[in-house]
Amino acid sequence: MQRYQVQCPLCDDTNEVNMKDHKTVYYIEGYNSNPNQLLSWSDPDPERTVGRDLLIEPEWVTKETVKCNNDHYIILNSCHYELVDQESDRLYGPASEFELRCPSCSYRLGEHTDYVVRLGSSLAMQYVLREITLSSDSNYKQTQAITTSKAGTYDQLSITQTCPHCGNQLFFNYSNRKVDRSDGFKDTTA
C-alpha cells in the first residue's frame, strides 16, 4: 500500500489516501455537496475536475469518495496503471511498476503490463503473468500461446520463451483473475 496526499480540486486542503501499489489515480472530481445524495435522472456535474476522464471499462475503475476539511466531496477515479497508457495522465501512483527480468542473467524482458492477456471481460478470460521460472511447474498447463480455446479450458497456463541474452528457456506462468483477482507479479525465480 502507498499513501498519497491528494489535494482537493476546490481548495488548498489535502487528504491522505491509501492505494495499492499498482493503482493510479487518473481523474478527480470536486463537488460542493455530496453527489450521492442528489436525486436526479443523471449524475450531477462536478464543480471542478483534475485530469482526463479516460474511456476505461467501468468494472476496472475504483471510485473512492473522500471529504476534505472544508466539506468538499472529492471522487477519486483509479485503476491498474496498465490501463492508463500515458504517464502524464497518472496523477497519483503507481508506487511501483513491475519490471521483468530473466531469472538466470537478469536481462530486462520488459514491463509487467506487456504480459497481461485480456481475451474478454470475464475474469476467466483475463490472464496475468504471475512468475517467470527456469523450470516447468506442474500446476500450469503448458501451451504455445494463450488463445480463447485454452483460456476457456484452463485457469493456469504456461508459455515457454527463450531469453534473448543468455539463451535459457523461460517459463512464463499465468493464472486468470478467476483464480487470483490481483494484478500482482510474484517473482522471477531460478
Image (tube, helix red, strand yellow):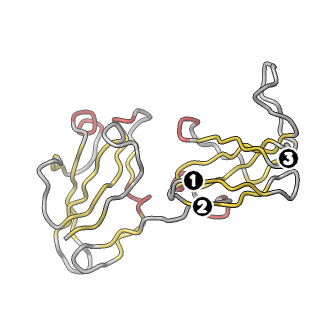
Is 171 displayed left or right of 108 in the figure?
left
Q: Name the mark on residue 186.
A: none
Residue type (three-letter) at the residue carrying disc 3? Arg
Viewer-nearest of discs 1 and 3: 1
Which residue: 48% across, 65% down? 97
Is 57 displayed left or right of 91 in the figure?
left
- Please tell me how crowded label 3 is: few (under 14), some (14-19), or many (20+) other residues with Cα within 10 Å: some
Residue under pointer 3: 48
As displayed, is residue 59 above or below residue 164? above
- 62 or 173, which lies in front? 62
Residue under pointer 2: 93
Residue type (three-letter) at the residue carrying disc 1? Met
Mark 2 and mark 3 lie on one chain; the one further toward the N terminus is 3
Viewer-nearest of discs 1 and 2: 1
Which residue: 37% across, 48% down? 117
Residue under pointer 1: 19
Is 107 displayed left or right of 122 in the figure?
left
Dot 1 and dot 2 residues touching (CB under 8 Å): yes
- Please tell me how crowded label 2 is: few (under 14), some (14-19), or many (20+) other residues with Cα within 10 Å: many
**Location of residue 67 in the rendering, given as x and y in whole percent from the top left corner:** 77, 44
Q: For the residues marked 1 and 2, what is the alpha-carbon distance in whole angstroms?
A: 8 Å
**Location of residue 182 in the rendering, given as x and y in whole percent from the top left corner:** 41, 47
Q: Secondary structure at mark 2?
A: loop
